[in-house]
Amino acid sequence: MSNQPNNYTDSTNQYSGGAAHQVNQAHAGDPHVHGAEVNGTQLNGPQQGGHRSGTEDPARQSLLNVRNEVGKAVVGQDPTVTGVLIALLCGGHVLLEGVPGVAKTLLVRALSTALSLETKRVQFTPDLMPGDVTGSLVYDSHSSEFTFREGPVFTNILLADEINRTPPKTQASLLEAMEERQVSVDGVSRPLPAPFIVAATQNPVEYEGTYPLPEAQLDRFLLKLTMPLPGRAEEIEVIRRHAGGFDPRDLAAAGVRAVAGAVELSNARAAVAQVAVAPEILAYIVDVVRATRSAPSFQLGVSPRGATALLNTSKAWAWLSGRPFVTPDDVKALSLPCLRHRVGLRPEAQMDGIHVDDVLGSILASVPVPR
């Protein structure tokens, strides 16, 4: 378990990987919230600025506007908002870890409102059945036939609240939905709406009565984002808003409005797909991933799926930062949230109090960076 927040930093060092990549970079605003470093623990998405070539990309600007809208309801969680945006850009799922009361549910609701996407929430409990999530066949007395009743998984953003509190068979009911974007019941496959991602939450400190997610399911989450407790100034702002009448159940009253939609998200995904990646960067990603497999503290290293996830998220982060190419710092920035849930510590390392993020940080410091 790691209690460190997400590691996002902007790339401020120029990288040349062929003629297509020889572009001077400008600082993307000030992405460091609390003086974070490249291998530190805090990642904040770009505010504005970054590399500019002509006019600002409307798709990028609309995605950056989403963060401002979410900020009207959620205080001090910009790194997590950026992480979920990256997951949406990559079409991947996200695991949100944090103690109760740090606005995990509110963040997802505000994000879906700002993106004009449908969201449904499922409270995972020990008695929840697979059909309660995916849907099931029900008997229609009028037609004397069985018809399929859709479950809450048929949405754009499924908030799976406390996913580790439900038994493995119910957890497994999401595997097909997460991987194939469809649900199969009684031999019939039914496609899910597009876009579709799962935003699952879990408590990092209360493990009694929980069912830890198996490695196969953890590997299907694109990112694991940790949501820390707010700092003093941020917590004062939270209390000030509530003292002024803020109601977390009424986002419209808070001024949260839709500033983007499925069309903008689709255009953004197409733009991310065009981000260039030099051969040296591809090799660097592979070297980082392979280093996790030989790390003495790990009994389980990152699979090739993790390598492709790191590639895709690095491209999305580079695009959000306003650059048409990926740098080594992009890879470093996304390594912790992208890899921390795909590795397993050895029992002796856990007994020594070693954290996954610490080992990953050592690996990033030791793997040669392309110049």
Image (spheres, rainbow, N blue to C red):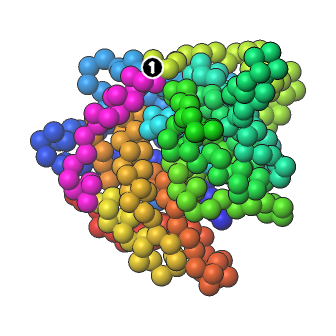
Q: In front here: 285 or 332?
A: 285
For the record, the magenta segment spans 265-283
Residue 268 magenta-drawn?
A: yes
| Quarter of image, res 112 | top right
Residue at figure coordinates x 21%, y 49% from the top left: 278
| Quarter of image, res 313 | top left
Give the residue at mark 1: 264
Name which residue type carries label 1: Glu
Residue 182 picture location, percent across and down = 54, 36
Q: In front here: 162 or 357?
A: 162
Q: Is residue 156 above or below residue 94?
A: above
Residue at figure coordinates x 41%, y 34% from the top left: 320
Residue at figure coordinates x 48%, y 82% from the top left: 296
Residue 267 magenta-drawn?
A: yes
| Quarter of image, res 48 | top left
- Image quadrant in which the C terminus is located: bottom left
**What element does badge 1 sit on?**
helix
Residue 72 picture location, percent across and down = 68, 24
For the stretch drawn in magenta, what is the main secondary structure? helix
Q: In front here: 321 or 266?
A: 266
Residue 73 in view here: no
